[in-house]
Image: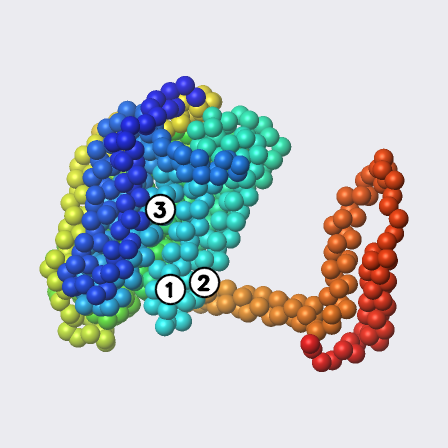
């Protein structure tokens, strides 16, 4: 682990820099006062993430050189629990996404909630959520990270159920909390096992204990529990169902959760622990296998979604599957491409959700079968939406173009041979073609495809021109990174992918920064042919949409929320039945339960003892002990007499 930590911060100035990453949490009391403040003052809620973003930029040159900045003080030494923060290139990349996109979302929300009293509640929750996400990516102690992990689940429950008077919001919030909360419990078990194996919960110690962890007999349990926690959070199949039903949240929430936070928390955990698990055969089969299934399921369902946010939600699932598939390859090059596409996805997905919010408020609906021909009414919105949509489809000279080409390159050069080596590139190309198909449908159905059909708002309401500011920023960024991708790929992305690479064994990864010659990749004839095939395939899918929709309509309708609610009702019924069986008002039965439980838990350890008596002589039985024994026996006899043929005579509860 030489070189893993090159600097340990001790001076007060540097400590203040690290602590400012949690500045959004310090601003929460101020946001609570915004309810009674002038409407324009809500814009000040953007200051905490903006200040944190600027401070991160100041520390960026340091961490890109491979240095790790640490700050720690012992919280509960007996439990080996410390408040420890860690800033390296990987955590800096995610923190910049969280704060940078957070600023744009806060600005967009200022116009989205203009004049509405719930604006203060939204800004309070989103700042708390932002602080929790920063806690995840900056935590050095895994237990400390888990606290913030659970906070994101709880706060996202409040954000998804923001409109608590609507049943669809309450159901979506319950479903998300059930799945992500269950994954959090699994993650807790995996972290505890890691702590038992390594003897520490500090990432510094854990990342250096790769061979120790993989050689331990509990490694399958560790890997399985960690993956359960990460895959449920990042909406991987079959846990992806909560993400589309989180669309009941306000559009700013959807834009933030889908682009830079929540679903990216699971991806971050996979990448953070990549040096420990990569190279193991189980890592490839589970992570890459689930990733490719998620990619195909998400991209397939997205084409048939009529709700704009529903289409974007399933497209998010497909891109998360793509990133997970790359991580599952277990190679340093694939990890670099995964991080590159993760950034690109955040940059083109956030503005598309913002576009959906503008259209929804203007037209009164998000149904693609109704909101046709919006280009006539919103030409600027059409232009600003075309760029991120084209980036999502992977068109040339936009940021998504190179990350998708590199994805195909890594799929063709996967670490396995045989049938798997042939199957993965085919499925990857199929998933890329699906992405072109749903991108075409999103853009064409929204802005062209004839005239609007029975819009609730007619004529559509014109938004404030300032609402387009964040969309303009993301459009320019997509173009900039499409023209000069090396600035990101060979800069922060390469540094983030290289974190902990010196701990990897040479058989799986090279401990150096992978450098791609993008000019060769761009002009490669086979890659250009594959790109053309994916685009033509997506165009063919969209052209045959009438036939495909008719076929899809015949398939059984599976609504995750309905099945989840039925399951919850059954669980509630079973629990009520169990309670009524136990709590029937009979004190004798309660005493029996206590005695039997005490006998089991105290008698079980005694079974394995050879001698039940110690060196000391037994004390004589005193009157009080004998009295208690008699009372206990009397209670058992009364309980037996109170039941005849299994019917309790004690009908009246106490």
Residue furthest front in the image: 623
Could you say whether the residue bearing mark 3 is in a helix, strand or loop? Answer: helix
In the rendered structure, which disc, 2 or 3, sits on the residue that comes first in sequence? Answer: 3
Q: Secondary structure at mark 2?
A: helix
Q: How many numbered markers are drawn?
A: 3
Q: Is residue 300 above or below residue 399?
A: below
Marks 2/3 in contact by CB < 8 Å: the verdict is no
In the picture, the disc for residue 283 is none
Residue 11 is drawn in which quadrant?
Answer: top left
Q: 654 or 488: nearer the eye?
A: 654
Colour scheme of this structure image? Answer: rainbow
260 left or right, relative to 321: left
Are dots 2 and 1 in contact, CB under 8 Å? yes
Residue 552 place in picture, x, y as percent: 41, 64
Residue under pointer 3 = 133
Give the mark toward the camera: 2 or 3: 3
Quarter location, residue 644? bottom right
Q: Position of residue 156 (x, y in %)?
A: 38, 56
Q: Secondary structure at mark 1?
A: loop
Q: CA distance from mark 2 to mark 1?
A: 8 Å
Which mark, residue 161?
A: 1
| Residue at the spot of label 2 | 174
Q: Position of residue 519 (x, y in %)?
A: 22, 29
Q: Is residue 422 visible?
A: no
Looking at the image, residue 617 lies above or below residue 590: above
Instruction: Compare marks 2 and 1 and give the one earlier in the sequence.
Output: 1
Q: Is residue 217 left or right of residue 627?
A: left
Query: Is residue 18 shown left or right of residue 237?
Result: left
Report the residue at 16% width, 59% height from top: 41
Q: Nearer the viewer, residue 582 or 166?
A: 582
Q: Quadrant of the C terminus?
A: bottom right
Q: Mark 3, residues whose alpha carbon is within 10 Å: few (<14), some, or many (≥20)?
A: many
């Amino acid at each position: 682990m030489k070189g893993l930590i090159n600097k340990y911060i001790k001076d007060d100035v540097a400590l203040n820099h690290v602590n400012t990453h949690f500045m959004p949490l310090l601003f929460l009391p101020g946001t609570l006062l915004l309810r009674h403040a002038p409407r324009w003052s809500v814009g000040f809620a953007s200051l905490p993430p903006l200040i944190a973003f600027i401070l991160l930029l100041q520390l960026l040159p340091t961490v890109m050189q491979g240095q790790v900045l640490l700050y720690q003080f012992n919280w509960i030494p007996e439990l080996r629990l410390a408040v420890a923060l860690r800033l390296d290139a990987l955590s800096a990349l995610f923190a910049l996404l969280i704060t940078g996109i957070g600023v744009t979302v806060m600005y967009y929300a200022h116009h989205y909630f203009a004049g509405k009293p719930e604006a203060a509640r939204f800004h309070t929750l989103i700042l708390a959520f932002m602080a929790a996400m920063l806690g995840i990516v900056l935590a050095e102690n895994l237990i400390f990270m888990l606290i913030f992990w659970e906070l994101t689940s709880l706060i996202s429950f409040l954000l998804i159920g923001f409109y608590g008077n609507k049943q669809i919001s309450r159901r979506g919030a319950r479903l998300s909390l059930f799945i992500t909360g269950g994954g959090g419990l699994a993650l807790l078990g995996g972290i505890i096992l890691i702590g038992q194996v390594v003897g520490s919960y500090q990432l510094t110690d854990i990342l250096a204990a790769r061979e120790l962890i993989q050689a331990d007999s509990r490694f399958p349990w560790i890997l399985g529990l960690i993956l359960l926690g990460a895959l449920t959070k990042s909406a991987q199949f079959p846990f992806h169902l909560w993400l589309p039903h989180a669309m009941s949240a306000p559009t700013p929430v959807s834009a933030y959760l889908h682009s830079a936070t929540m679903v990216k928390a699971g991806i971050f955990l996979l990448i953070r622990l990549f040096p420990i698990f990569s190279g193991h055969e189980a890592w490839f089969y589970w992570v890459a296998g689930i990733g490719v299934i998620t990619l195909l399921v998400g991209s397939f369902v997205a084409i048939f979604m009529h709700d704009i946010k529903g289409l974007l939600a399933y497209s998010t699932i497909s891109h998360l599957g793509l990133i997970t598939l790359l991580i599952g390859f277990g190679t340093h090059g694939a990890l670099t491409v995964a991080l590159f596409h993760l950034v690109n996805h955040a940059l083109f997905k956030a503005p598309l959700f913002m576009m959906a919010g503008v259209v929804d408020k203007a037209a009164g609906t998000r149904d693609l079968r109704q909101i046709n021909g919006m280009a006539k009414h919103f030409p600027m919105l059409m232009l600003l939406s075309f760029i991120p949509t084209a980036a999502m489809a992977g068109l040339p000279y936009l940021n998504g173009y190179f990350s998708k080409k590199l994805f195909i390159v890594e799929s063709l050069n996967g670490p396995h041979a045989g049938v798997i080596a042939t199957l993965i590139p085919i499925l990857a190309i199929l998933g890329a073609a699906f992405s072109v198909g749903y991108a075409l449908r999103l853009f064409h159905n929204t802005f062209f495809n004839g005239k609007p059909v029975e819009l609730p708002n007619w004529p559509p309401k014109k938004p404030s021109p300032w609402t387009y500011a964040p969309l303009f920023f993301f459009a320019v960024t997509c173009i900039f990174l499409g023209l000069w991708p090396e600035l990101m790929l060979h800069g922060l992305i390469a540094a983030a992918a290289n974190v902990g690479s010196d701990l990897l064994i040479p058989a799986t990864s090279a401990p150096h920064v992978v450098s791609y010659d993008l000019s060769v990749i761009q002009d490669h004839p086979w890659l250009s042919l594959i790109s053309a095939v994916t685009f033509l395939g997506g165009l063919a899918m969209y052209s045959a949409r009438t036939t495909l929709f008719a076929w899809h309509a015949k398939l059984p309708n599976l609504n995750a929320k309905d099945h989840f609610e039925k399951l919850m009702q059954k669980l509630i019924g079973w629990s009520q039945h169990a309670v009524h069986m136990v709590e029937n008002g009979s004190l004798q039965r309660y005493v029996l339960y206590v005695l039997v439980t005490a006998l089991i838990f105290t008698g079980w350890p005694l079974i394995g003892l050879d001698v039940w008596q110690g060196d000391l002589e037994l004390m004589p039985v005193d009157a009080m002990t004998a009295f208690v024994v008699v009372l206990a026996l009397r209670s058992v006899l009364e309980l037996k007499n109170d039941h005849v043929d299994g019917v309790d005579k004690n009908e009246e509860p106490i």
